[in-house]
Image (tube, rainbow, N blue to C red):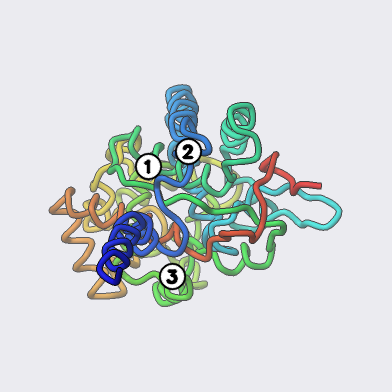
Amino acid sequence: MAQSMSFFMVIVLLAFAPICLSSKTYGGYLFPQFYDRSCPQAKEIVKSIVAKAVAKEARMAASLLRLHFHDCFVKGCDASLLLDNSGTIISEKRSNPNRNSVRGFEVIDEIKKTLEKECPQTVSCADILALAARDSTVLVGGPNWEVPLGRRDSRGASLSGSNYNIPAPNNTFNTILTKFKLKGLDIVDLVALSGSHTIGNARCTSFRQRLYNQSGNSLPDYTLEQSYAAQLRATCPRSGGDQNLFFLDFVSPMKFDNSYFKNLLASKGLLNSDQVLVTKNQQSLALVKQYAENNELFFEHFAKSMVKMGNISPLTGFKGEIRKNCRKINN
């Protein structure tokens, strides 16, 4: 009898082993197979709509990737960023890092609408953001990774959290690193995830101080290569043109690769928060050099850091909700 019970227990443990391994590997209750039974077409639906959006406008890949980043750094990866203003909610879209900047909400809306038809109130908006970020990266030549799933959506937003927790273009290196560490991320994550600036754009207002008044003394930032600075001044004047757009990586702006890091070594990082990776810390400088020389290493670290970032304080189990509309909480 004892032998039979022991054998039975082994079978039970083996049966549940994949689930336990998934939970341990991907953090908490998140695992890539979360929707395999409840909504088996979920990943394909997200992928196809993202592909259509990026084919229509290549810039959208960076925009969708950024949505996930700006969501996770506030209250965790809970889709709080997607909520519009309502009677009880002040939207994070109004924060300084997001106002007139974050975009791609209509793509998320289309994905959610399609998923609600396929499997109502099953796939969270937070998971849509995570999948869309991965799919966008792959579509422009970046690395692929399995996205842990099972996040739920918040029933609130944090305007103050959005204002203070998201790293800003003019933050010092130590401030940026502190913001990463507060989310459980380290200096490798900081440098690897900064590599997402290999695609996308920044507004003139995000880096103007580097061209004209870096330290409050009416002098430019001399860590910025001067011929490159002159090109930027031509369309980013001392006043006006705040919304003029500039490629974060002028060498291969539509391709996800390691040219961003090569630009930094040539003193041609667009944002102050980019260039300080080279000028203010020896460990980050060493990582920039490694990634500039080894694209595969950059891809490997970027994928790992994206999974790690995606595990910041997710709502799981019975916490939060599965929104029917990503822009508002359920009634």
Q: In the image, residue 240 lies at what x, y percent?
A: 61, 46
Side (left or right) of 287 relative to 181: left
Q: Which is in the foreground here, disc 3 or disc 1? A: 3
SS for dot 2 = loop
Kindly identify the residue that appears in the image at 48 percent across and 75 percent down.
182
Q: Give residue 37's mark.
A: 2
Q: Could you tell me if residue 224 is visible in this image? A: no
Side (left or right) of 106 relative to 129: right
N-terminal of the pair, mark 3 or mark 2, is: 2
Whether 155 is drawn above or below 48: the answer is: below
Type of amino acid at the residue the image marks with label 3: Phe
**Pointer 1 local density, CA inside 10 Å: few below 14, some 14–19, many at least 20:** many
Give how far apart the Cα atoms at labels 3 and 2 are. Answer: 35 Å
Residue 157 placement: quadrant: bottom right
**Pointer 2 local density, CA inside 10 Å: few below 14, some 14–19, many at least 20:** few
Whether 180 is drawn above or below 133: the answer is: below
Give how far apart the Cα atoms at labels 3 and 1 are. Answer: 21 Å
N-terminal of the pair, mark 3 or mark 1, is: 3
Kindly identify the residue that appears in the image at 41 percent across and 37 percent down.
136
Q: Give residue 19's mark.
A: none
Q: Give residue 180's mark.
A: 3
SS for dot 1 = loop
Identify the residue under disc 1: 199
Q: Label 1 near label 2: C-beta < 8 Å?
A: no
Q: Which is in the foreground here, disc 3 or disc 2? A: 2
Type of amino acid at the residue the image marks with label 1: Ile
Kindly identify the residue that appears in the image at 63 percent across and 32 percent down.
116
Q: Quadrant of the N terminus?
A: bottom left
